[in-house]
Image: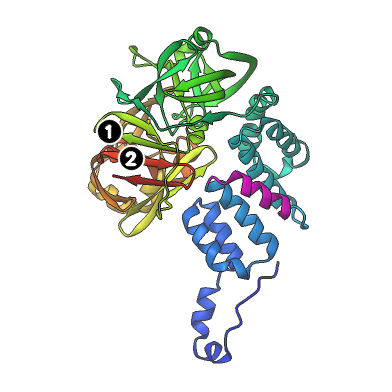
Amino acid sequence: MKTNQPNYPKRFALLFPILVITVFAQTPDANIQSLIDRKEYFKAKDSLVVYAEMLPVEKSLYFGAILDNVFNRPNISNEKIRHCLEFPLSDTLVAELLKTKLNNDIRMNDYKSATVVTDTLLNRYLAFLDSATRTDIGNDGKAWRALASNPPTTADISCETTLPMKKDIVGLLRIPVRFGKKSMKFVFDTGANLSVVSTKTARKLGVKVFPTEFDVQGATGNLVKSKIGVADEIRLGDIVVKNVVFIVMPDKELRFLGFYKVNGIIGFPVINQLKEIRLNYAENTLTIPAIPTNSEEKNFAMEGLMPLINVGYRNESLVFTFDTGAQSTSLYPKYYEKYAAEIDSTYELGSIISGSAGGMEKNRAYKLTNVQMRIAGRDVVLPEVSLLKDVQTEHSKYFFGNLGQDAIRQFKIVVINFDKMFVAFE
């Protein structure tokens, strides 16, 4: 595909041929695609702004659709996909656009459309999906099909609402959630792709459970046979959230260390509907404003249903997953690959035990000390951080780490905005 090149004056071509060759050794569309493939989304967004007028219309729409999905603008992304599909495209690009549309539909709780897109991908574009993606789409499609007639999740936020927030014995944040006249404390976790409830709790709270089984991957990578369920309505203080989707997991998969159990988790789909949350660690409260705020800082993104944050480190920008449910920050193998010589000469390889919904697991890891970062314009120092040596999940393969409570609790208030896509500290 031809790429329009800038019309440089001839004297530049004569005086600076080496410079021109260096700048365009990689075409603009190849540059942006490479950044997206490496999941360096913040850099890809900046590159698209710079090169937008140099790209063919269909490529500009294609990259725009991908990045609008990443920066949580699913409606706009789907509109660009619709326009982009009017152009003659390779089957590979069509498959990528359909995967993006699938994620947009899931994020907008349009499970009927998600089911149609799932069938299209598996029936017409199977050859353009790798084996892992085929398995994931086919597996997850069981849940979307069960939910196809379910109305979308909605949140009625008529006024600012503040909830008490308590850190439990293992460091997870819990908030009160009401199901009718019954109330129970659930873990509040931005890193949970979907909300979760145990089988026993679902029965107790009247969650409608569908018979379809599918596999759920926990943070340790283990697969757990689970079902899907829907609560007609839950209440978070004065906020009414309707048609809430839950993964219903066996009770034993939500028990840890022999004494600790989780009844339920409020995850991304519900939190996304709240638009903005304010975690006040000084007063142990969670506030949802009636009207979301804005900020010039645009440091927040999404990989599927997983929040991402742009972290400054040694004058570079590194993308981390962002999990308010994680007690501590972890570094991933990609970080080790970048700084392997320094790490091997400074630290000894040991092991740690980690766990989540889905079980506990022992992993090879380094213990790094005094790790300095810059997040949302603020300096953060972590006295001790675990660096996982081996890839556990897709997220640990592509990102530099997972930002947890030990970083964000260094500030009184953490603002997480899913509308304008920023994280700020006060």
Q: Residue 18's mark?
A: none
Q: Earlier in the sequence, mark 2 or mark 1?
A: 1
User: Residue 335's x, y, as percent?
Assistant: 37, 48
For the image shown, how many numbered marks are present on the structure? 2
Residue in view at x 70 percent, y 46 percent: 95
Q: Which residue reaches farthest front? A: 158
On the picture, is 138 further left or further right than 233?
right
Q: Amino acid at mark 1?
A: Tyr
Whether residue 358 can be seen here = no
Q: Nearer the viewer, residue 244 or 241?
A: 241
- The image quadrant where one finds the N terminus is bottom right
- Helix, strand or loop status at disc 2: strand
Q: Answer yes or no: do the residues labelled 2 and 1 have beta carbons within 8 Å?
A: yes
- The image quadrant where one finds the C terminus is top left
Q: Main secondary structure of the magenta part?
A: helix
What span is colored magenta in the figure?
72-84
10 Å crowding of disc 2: few (<14), some (14-19), many (20+): some
Q: Toward which corner of the image does residue 389 lie, by quadrant?
A: top left
**Residue bearing the label numbered 1:** 281
Residue in view at x 58 percent, y 18 percent: 232
Q: Amino acid at mark 2?
A: Val
User: Residue 267's x, y, as percent?
Assistant: 47, 29
User: Residue 24's x, y, as percent?
Assistant: 55, 73
Is residue 59 shown above or below 4?
above
**Residue bearing the label numbered 2:** 414
Q: CA distance from mark 2 to mark 1?
A: 8 Å
